Image: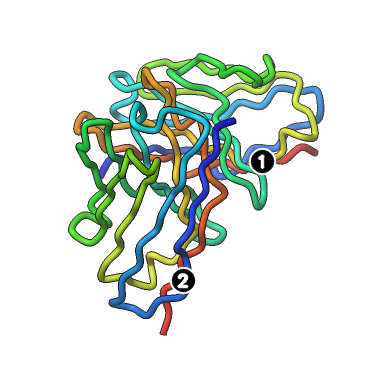
Amino acid sequence: SYELTQPPSVSVSPGQTARITCSGDALPKQYAYWYQQKPGQAPVLVIYKDSERPSGIPERFSGSSSGTTVTLTISGVQAEDEADYYCQSADSSGTRVFGTGTKVTVL
Amino acid sequence: EVQLVESGGGLVQPGGSLRLSCAASGFTFSSYDMHWVRQATGKGLEWVSAIGTAGDTYYPGSVKGRFTISRENAKNSLYLQMNSLRAGDTAVYYCAREGVGATGFDYWGQGTLVTVSS
């Protein structure tokens, strides 16, 4: 089955930049999406179609794509950004898949 | 305001069945693809099923043949029929709306807990 691989954790100091990668063989052909999930809450979409930001999501969240890897960048990290982040994509049959998840810790 | 409210979760024995519901409001339900996503305690998100506006359905291998997604547009409702349940199906189940034009899962419910245990 198709897999998306993320680092388990990323630590960053306030005001610095956090980068979270997501790797998968189909990413050159399929869009990637990113979700933020805080404890006890439902996920929230923060990036769609690799690099588009939904309305209401702060500009410090951005996405990029290069080959089989997509990256979520959080610039000027704030304490409120501490959360789990998941990438998501699809394969050619329409099956969706989530990445393994990355816990972002703000030091 | 878009709202998705899941119901139907609970405790069920292994091998049993359960039907989850998701009540949608605040948007034209029939115009959107809908999904179920689950999350076991302390684990990551797992996509469970999808249904398109035309009623086309999709499943991962882990639930195919056991779970059935359906929708009733007249009632603005999404369903997940779960049969032959296993301990590994224990999770919070979320319904989610997929935005038009492949814009991702833009709205989520708060989830309903399914526990499979004897």
Q: Amino acid at mark 1?
A: Ala
Seen in the picture, residue A74 relative to A52 is either above or below; the reply is below
> Which image quadrant: the C terminus of chain B?
bottom left
Q: Give the Cα separation between the discs numbered 2 and 1.
A: 25 Å
Position in image of residue A8 (x %, y %):
55, 44
Which of the pair B84/A99 is nearer the observer? Answer: B84
Q: Is residue B114 above or below residue B94?
A: below
Where residue B38 appears, x then y in whole percent?
A: 44, 53
Are there few (<14), some (14-19), or many (20+) residues within 10 Å of tag 1? some
Which amino acid type corresponds to the residue marked 2 in the rendered image? Answer: Thr
Which residue extends farthest bottom? B118
The secondary element bearing badge 2 is classed as strand
| Mark 2 crowd level (few <14, some 14–19, many ≥20, 10 Å Cα) | many
How is colour applied across the structure in the image? rainbow
Residue at 66% x, 44% y is: A38
Q: Secondary structure at mark 1?
A: strand
Quadrant into which the N terminus of chain B falls:
top right
Instruction: Choose between A10 and A58: the one closer to the eye.
Output: A58
Chain letter for mark 1, please.
A
Instruction: Identify the residue position indicated by label 2 in the image.
Output: B115
> How far across and how far down the image is residue B88, in percent?
38, 67
Q: Which residue is mark 1?
A: A83
Residue B116 falls in image quadrant: bottom left
Residue at 19 percent across and 33 percent down: it is: A93
Residue A3 % position (x, y):
34, 41
In the image, B115 versus A85, the foreground residue is B115
Query: On residue B66, which mark appears?
Result: none
Q: Are marks 2 and 1 on the same chain?
A: no
Picture residue at 21% right of the left edge, 54% below the top? B64
Which residue shows up at 31% across the image and 32% down it?
A90
| Residue B17 falls in image quadrant | bottom left
Chain letter of the residue carrying label 2? B
